[in-house]
Image: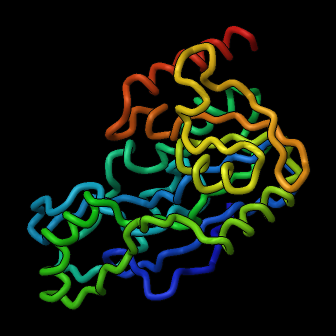
Amino acid sequence: MQNNSETVPNAYFPFGQPLKLVKQQDRTPKKVFVLGVYSSAVHADWYSADGKPLCQALAVASEPYIFWNGENAADIIAKITIPPEAGHLEPADVKYNGSSGRVLDTLYLAPLGFSRSDAWLCDLVPHSYMNDNQKNAIEANYIEASKKYGLSVASIPEKPDNLIDANRLNEILAELEASQAETIILLGDEPIKWFLSKVSDCKKTKLGDFGRDTKTYGFPHAVHINDKPYTVIPLVHVRQAGGLGPNSSEWEQLHKNWVEEKKKRN
């Protein structure tokens, strides 16, 4: 799969890789449009020159394609050059690289009878952000090392309060139109809040507004966007479904039940 060459101005990961825009590359018509929140990243473990662990699962590059499944992580990391005196990088544990993509394939698309080739993938924000864990790691380890060894400044932006603007909303609408998909999968609260409630006749703003029990979770809803009918399937964020980091056991179980029910019907 190809990487999108567009970059975010003045935004760099630790060790110098630019922050790239990660968007759908296969622009042929699709059966389903999947809308997530923002892109993930490639993560590495950083060791000192004498082999001492300095930082685990540090984001060091943009994912090579949207909802990356973790392939070739070692090759991507090996291409990141750092001074020997600053140590070296190794691929982080497999759970930190491509987990969202693997969860999407197995716990969302497959239960609905779709493959990756059937899906047009999109995020509200087409690049990654620096979360609190990454910020703490950079402040604790990277800033001092960057001054000592002449490393580039880490300048990945943090997630803003206002996630998208009108221009980005229009870009997503254009992707939806180009996809020719009539089914939309929304991954968690934020695609509902920042997209669905803004562009459709459905004014719900979070997943819980659709119900939070086995009878209502994952139920398809008819909506209109720009006077065109769509079927929307609101589901949890991949973090919840895959148990990736902090999550709600309630929502995780609801999604597991939904997956099992889909398997029975297929």
- Left or right: residue 221 compared with residue 75: right
Residue furthest out toward the top: 264
Q: Establish if 103 lies above or below 119.
A: above
Locate residue 221: give its quadrant: top right
Quadrant of the snapshot with the N terminus: bottom right
* Colour basis: rainbow
Quadrant of the snapshot with the C terminus: top right
138 and 220: which is toward the camera: 220
- Left or right: residue 215 compared with residue 99: right
- Left or right: residue 110 compared with residue 53: right
* Residue 84 x/y as whole percent: 21, 79
* Residue 100 x/y as whole percent: 50, 44
At x 68% / y 56%, what residue is drawn? 198
Q: How many marks?
A: 0
At x 82% / y 61%, what residue is drawn? 27
- Left or right: residue 3 compared with residue 42: right
At x 76% / y 33%, what residue is drawn? 114
150 and 177: which is toward the camera: 177
148 and 244: which is toward the camera: 244
Locate residue 74: give its quadrant: bottom left
* Residue 68 x/y as whole percent: 56, 52
22 and 75: which is toward the camera: 22
Q: Establish if 168 lies above or below 212.
A: below
* Residue 207 x/y as whole percent: 55, 36
At x 49% / y 31%, what residue is drawn? 241
Q: Establish if 116 lies above or below 58.
A: above
